[in-house]
Image (spheres, rainbow, N blue to C red):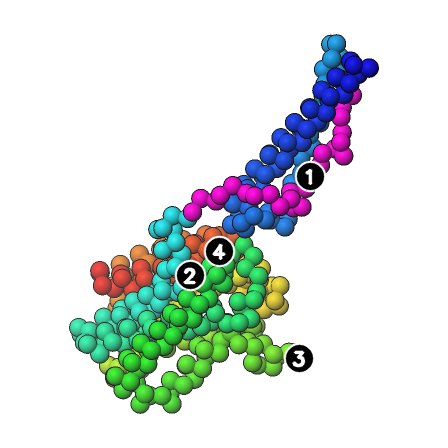
Amino acid sequence: MLRQAQHDSFLLRLLLRGCSEAVRNLSEVVATDAGSSGLGDEARAHGDKTRTYQLRVASAGRTQPVLRPAALILPVANLHLPARPVAARHPLGRVLDALLYSSAWLAAAAAAQTAATLHQWPAISSAGYRLVALVFAATLLVYNLDAALPFKHREPAGTSARKAWQQRHRPLLLGLAAGAAGAAGFFFFVDGWWRYWPGLTPLVALALLYSWPLWPWHGRRRALREIPLLKGFLIALVWTAVTVGLPVLLLRHPVAEVAGLFGQRFCLIMVITIVFDVRDYGRDRRAGTRTFPGVLGVAGARRLALGFLLASVALGLARGAPPLAVLLPGVLTASVVRAAEETRSDYFYALLTDGLLLVQAAAYFVF
């Protein structure tokens, strides 16, 4: 009886030790999974893992039967154990996220494209600098308002770091939009742009209403961006009108003299929009939005983007732009187009693809 009690006590201690180790190891799994995905104390919904611990007792040179207390199968998703503290993101990483996901980087690209247009003619005047500031503020206003729309804020972020950041910082986006609206209004009235308001109204309406589901289409209301194949053309039209049309209006140049620049800029923006359509391919397909990747496939959309890029380069050379200012950014843009995939990171699109507009604009100041 004493020997049997000691044996049972020994088995019980081993069982408790095994359970303790199982819980400890599972806690590590939760911490690792949750930390890597940024989900805090909860594991990914589709990343549940299980571990089975079996205890064997060796006695008298033979292996005892395996102990299987409910197989000790403990699903991670059902545990609510404290995870290891996740290392804080580096301050430079947080600054980069804020720069990219608040659309400040994109607004800088729009301002740079406007400055590059003004650079085609004599030295930029103070009114030209104010126009560059106006375009920066207006771009910041439009894109932050779009990111902070109520129905977008309620959409699941999924694996998008950009969308998750924007949802966490919605008050910041609204604050940036308000500040940008004040700055844009100031520059708008200082230089008398209000005199062109009748002609600018459609442009402003397209920019602000682009994502609002206001238009009846096939039995339900859709946003302009959801109309098949229209999204890229609308974006290219608005960007070309702002970054080329406004400087031409400021300097009172005949439109016929800058038709080549209009075409070159339109084709360049089309390249960028098709690359972003590749990024949004899965989401657009689930929403029923027909874009070029949805119609032509990703490979076909990339070929179309390269066709627009070739047209942009040809128009730039034809109008007498410095060859290096056209060809070098063109080679870099072609590399990005060929590398575009839906699975690329947010940095590939927000930093590198939008950055192409800055590189292309800077090239006109260098060469």
What residue is shown at x 31% (from left), y 59% (from top)? 359
Q: How far is the residue under mark 3 from the one under mark 4?
A: 33 Å
In this figure, which residue is indicated by the disc labeled 2?
Answer: 101
Disc with the residue nearer the chain's start (2 vs 4): 2
In this figure, which residue is indicated by the disc labeled 4?
Answer: 161
In this figure, which residue is indicated by the disc labeled 3?
Answer: 219
The residue type indicated by label 3 comes to Gly
Q: Which of 7 and 25 is in front in this view?
A: 7
Disc with the residue nearer the chain's start (1 vs 2): 1
In this figure, which residue is indicated by the disc labeled 1?
Answer: 74
Q: Residues within 10 Å of mark 4 (few under 14, many from 20)?
A: some
Q: How crowded is mark 1: few (under 14 residues within 10 Å), some or many (20 or more)?
A: some
Q: How far is the residue under mark 4 from the one under mark 1?
A: 30 Å
Disc with the residue nearer the chain's start (4 vs 1): 1
What residue is shown at x 62% (from left), y 46% (from top)? 80
- Asked if residue 138 is positioned above or below residue 363 in the image, the reply reads below
Residue 300 percent location from the top left of the image: 53, 59
The answer to whether the residue labelled 3 contacts the one labelled 4, judged by CB atoms less than 8 Å apart, is: no
Callout in the foreground (3, 1):
1
The residue type indicated by label 4 comes to Ala
Callout in the foreground (1, 2):
1
